[in-house]
């Protein structure tokens, strides 16, 4: 089977972290951060097209008991807006990815932004997906 390009999203109300991976290499890396400004769906569509992505992996938030939250509903509603894209959209649990992302960025002892945290969280979401589905 040939390798495929996956893009993942860490959807927030202000920013969307974006990561990319190739199923042949199975290593996710941060790609960019999109501002939520009304153009984010077009931005995602452009990334999917430019990167020849075959699947969009969207982080699925839940609380520590595994239950849906207000953020879960926000992500589900946002994902509906992506339904015009021509690629399959799958959800991947994103529990604690933003916390882990920030811890790892702090450990690097370099300056970082909230956008960096979002893109790194998207990377962790995608890495988890790769390990579960392409490992």
Image (cartoon, rainbow, N blue to C red):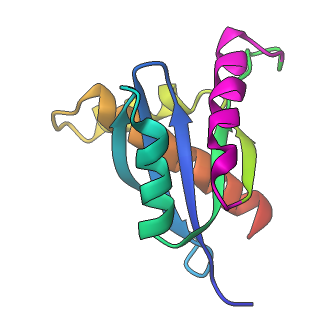
Residue at image position (41%, 68%) is 50
In the picture, which quadrant includes the N terminus? bottom right
**Left or right of 33 in this view: 66:** right
Magenta residues (range): 67-87
Most common SS among magenta residues = helix
Q: Is residue 17 left or right of residue 11?
A: left
107, 30: nearer the viewer: 30
Residue 34 visible, this orientation: yes
- Point out residue 77 in the picture as x, y percentages from the top left corner: 69, 24
Vertical side of 120 occupied by 131: above or below: below
In the orientation shown, which residue stands out farthest toward the left?
111
Q: Quadrant of residue 55?
A: bottom right
Between 51 and 84, which is closer to the camera in this rendering? 84
From the viewer's side, name the closer residue of 84 and 43: 84
x, y (%) of residue 13? Answer: 48, 18
Q: Residue at x 72, y 51 (%)?
A: 89
Q: Measuring 59% from the left and 55% from the top, which residue is drawn there?
A: 127
Q: Is residue 82 magenta?
A: yes
Q: Quadrant of residue 115?
A: top left
For this orientation, the residue located farthest to the bottom is 1
Total residue callouts? 0
Percent across and percent down for residue 58 are 64, 42
Residue 103 makes an appearance in the image:
no
Q: Quarter holding the C terminus?
A: bottom right
Q: At 41% from the left edge and 28% from the top edge, which residue is drawn? A: 38
Q: Choose between 7 and 113: the one closer to the eye.
A: 7
Residue at the extreme top: 70
Q: In the image, residue 29 lies at what x, y percent? A: 43, 58
């Amino acid at each position: 089977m040939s390798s495929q390009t996956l893009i993942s999203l860490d959807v927030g109300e202000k920013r969307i972290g974006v990561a990319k991976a190739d199923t042949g290499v199975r290593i996710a890396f941060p790609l960019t951060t999109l501002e939520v400004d009304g153009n984010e769906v077009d931005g995602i569509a452009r990334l999917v097209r430019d990167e020849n992505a075959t699947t969009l992996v969207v982080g699925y938030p839940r609380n520590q008991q595994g239950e849906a939250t207000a953020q879960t509903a926000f992500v589900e509603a946002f994902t509906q807006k992506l339904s015009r894209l021509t690629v399959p959209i799958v959800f991947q649990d994103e529990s604690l990815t933003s916390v882990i992302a920030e811890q790892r960025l702090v450990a690097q002892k370099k300056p970082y932004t909230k956008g960096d945290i979002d893109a790194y969280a998207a990377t962790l979401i995608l890495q988890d997906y790769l390990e579960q589905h392409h490992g």
